[in-house]
Image (spheres, rainbow, N blue to C red):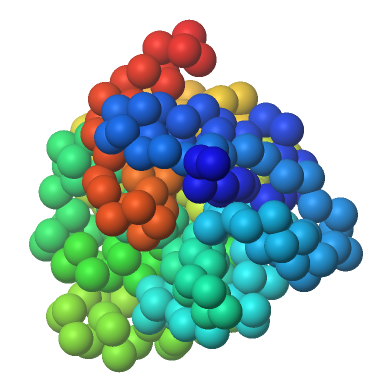
Amino acid sequence: MSDLYCVMGNPVEHSKSPWIHARFAQLTGQDMHYDKRLIALDGFARGIAAFRAEGGKGCNITVPFKFEAAPIATRLTPRAELAGACNVLRFDGDEVFADNTDGVGLVNDITRNAGVRLAGRDVLLIGAGGAAAGVLGPLIEAGPRLIAVANRTQAKAQHLIDRHASLAQQHRVKLQAPELLQVTDDFDVVINATATSLSGEAVPVSPAVLRRGTLACDLMYGPAAQGFMDWAAAHGAAPRDGLGMLVEQAAEAFLVWRGVRPPSAQVLEELRAALG
Ligand code: ATR
């Protein structure tokens, strides 16, 4: 029988993860089956127990369960601990190994797929919720000069940078938490980790943060990213959606489970083509 994996979430029906992992498995010759599981909002622990009883080897965790995954882990990577959230679990007998590959997925998409250097650059991260917390650690490890974390509720951004202060010091990265509406410097890379695109609201920051050629990434893809992408393009920036991050975080999860790195750039290209 093939090794069993899945993605657990609510909602989960539109997840691209089964397609991505099936393609990774095909291209690397791994014998595995990956499906999706809709989990009741109050049923995360039950869902995990049922999947393990079926013999599941590991799973991805998506909205809204990423924060519930950390407490069930017996071993947590430092990046998952810093994020306070997990998107990957691996079941090793009685042990539950947990990781967060969202941030490294974003960094790999920016540096490898988009070909934009982060080392020594100035980065603006908009938002300080779960999505922002998931990517800040790996962004710091990529060694930019500065990361400004700007959030509607400034205290949350301050709390997030305080939690990352020692990692930032270790990598000699300057962290700031400016007032969202007062950010008027321009940046090399701007990352939208707020939920504004999803609700169709305006981008909550001045276009002065963009200069010609700034890489402007949304962590979402599809219609949810369109508002931010249009805004970025209208102000001369290079827009990028979160599809590459999705494929790259999946590639890192695949590596955690199977010990093999799949050809993620090829699969990203195929997925873009399949989505039209
Ligand atoms: P996620 O897990 O997707 O990050 P979240 O933890 O609820 O979801 O965080 C949502 C983020 O979007 C927060 O940074 C939130 O700002 P607040 O911390 O001030 O709530 C941000 N956000 C949501 N709606 C927004 C809006 N209309 N303008 C600006 N920021 C907004």
Whether residue 229 sits left or right of residue 261 in the image: it is right
Q: Work out whether residue 185 or residue 241 is closer to the camera in this orientation and state it.
A: 241
Residue furthest front as drawn: 1
Q: Note whether residue 11 is visible.
A: yes
Q: Residue at x 28, y 83 (%)?
A: 167
Q: Nearer the viewer, residue 20 or 157?
A: 20
- Locate residue 213: give its quadrant: top left
The residue drawn where x is 50% and y is 15% is 275
Answer with left or right where residue 125 lies relative to residue 172. Answer: right
Q: How many dots with numbers?
A: 0
Residue 18 image position (x, y, % from top left): 55, 34
Residue drawn at (48%, 24%), measured in percent from left and top?
230
In screen coordinates, is 275 left or right of 54? left
Q: Is residue 15 above or below residue 205?
A: above
Picture layout, residue 198 above or below residue 183: above
Residue 272: horizontal and vertical position, in percent? 41, 19
- Residue at image x 18%, y 54%? 118
58 or 116: which is nearer to us?
58
Q: Is residue 239 visible?
A: no
Location of residue 65 with respect to 109 vertically, above or below: below
Examine the image and state in which quarter residue 70 appears.
bottom right
Please state, as top left, top right, bottom left or bottom right, where the N terminus lies in the image: top right
- Of 175 and 82, nearer the camera is 82
**Residue situated furthest bottom in the rendering:** 166
Choose top left, top right, bottom left or bottom right for residue 268: top left
- Residue 168 lies, with reference to residue 11, above or below; the image says below
Q: Residue 200 in the image: x percent, y percent?
A: 69, 34
Q: Position of residue 142 (x, y in %)?
A: 20, 63
